[in-house]
Image (cartoon, rainbow, N blue to C red):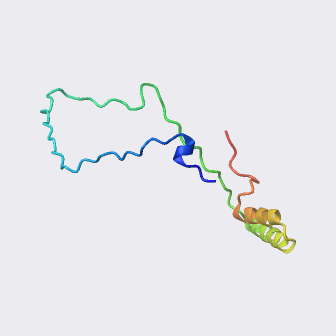
Amino acid sequence: MAATRASTGHSKPRVAAAVSTTPERKRTTTTKPASTKATTKKSTTGAGVTKKRAPPANHKRKPNVKDNVEGTLEKAEGTATRKPGKKAAGAKKMNGAEGKTGRTRK
């Protein structure tokens, strides 16, 4: 059963807000003359505050021929055995992103 406004207790009359159709006048503001004082630019970050830098992207090592061959074989093995993890590991090895001997952190 549909709830009516009378049954829910919200039976106040609907009143549409009256919208004025008369055009409004544009108000102009006067501009102040430029001050004669010299202005200095203040630092936006504050004294002694340094912004955080973005972390560096993960470093990839350059894969050699052996890595390309091993990665290709591993990827093919993953495709044949329907193991997506093995396939992804082979592709990663081919790209030099498997984390074998990348740049170490200091």
The x, y position of residue 11, in whole percent, is: 48, 42
In depth, the one of 88 and 21 nearer the eye is: 21
Task: Identify the residue at horizontal 61%, vertical 50% (top origin).
Answer: 57
Looking at this view, name the residue that lies furthest to the front.
6
Snapshot quadrant of residue 15: top left
Which image quadrant: the C terminus?
A: top right
Seen in the picture, residue 82 relative to 99 is either above or below; the reply is below
The x, y position of residue 23, in whole percent, is: 18, 49
Question: Does residue 26 appear left or right of residue 18 in this picture?
Answer: left
In depth, the one of 57 and 1 nearer the eye is: 1
Task: Identify the residue at horizontal 84%, vertical 67% (top origin).
Answer: 83
Question: Does residue 46 appear left or right of residue 38 in this picture?
Answer: right
The x, y position of residue 40, in whole percent, is: 26, 29
Question: Does residue 104 appear left or right of residue 83 in this picture?
Answer: left
Picture mark count: 0
In depth, the one of 67 and 33 nearer the eye is: 33
In depth, the one of 40 and 8 nearer the eye is: 8
Task: Identify the residue at horizontal 75%, vertical 57% (top origin).
Answer: 98
The x, y position of residue 29, in whole percent, is: 15, 38
